Image: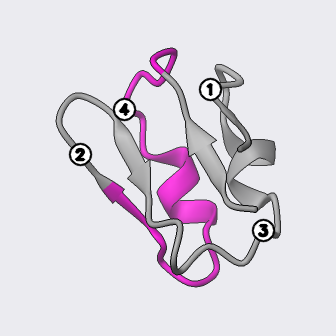
Amino acid sequence: MAFKINDECVACGACAGACPIGAIVEGDGKYEINADECVDCGSCAAACPTGAISAE
């Protein structure tokens, strides 16, 4: 089960910096998690200041 970034994302990049495997990239107006690369560690969700990341 991968994590997902919802529309509350403010594109701050905190999640991308927290991802230990680089599975998060900047998308169109918000960041996106590559579900095939995500290892479900939860680091991104813990780093998100708006709570825009949750388990899918």
Q: Is residue 37 left or right of residue 13?
A: right
Query: In which quarter of the view is residue 49 placed?
Result: top right
Q: Which residue is mark 2?
A: 27
Q: Nearer the viewer, mark 1 or mark 3?
A: 3
Q: Main secondary structure of the magenta part?
A: loop
Write the residue at 53% across / 80% down: 37
Q: Which residue is mark 3?
A: 40
Mark 1 and mark 3: Cα distance apart in space = 15 Å
Q: Which residue is mark 1?
A: 52
Residue 54 x, y percent position in the rendering: 74, 37
Work out whether 3 lies above or below 5. below
Mark 3 and mark 2: Cα distance apart in space = 20 Å
Q: Amino acid at mark 1?
A: Ala
Q: Secondary structure at mark 3?
A: loop
Which mark sits nearer the N-terminus, 3 or 2? 2
Q: Amino acid at mark 2?
A: Gly
Residue 41 x, y percent position in the rendering: 82, 69
Please state the extent of the stretch shown in magenta in the rendering.
7-25
Which mark sits nearer the N-terminus, 4 or 3? 4
Residue 18 x, y percent position in the rendering: 63, 63
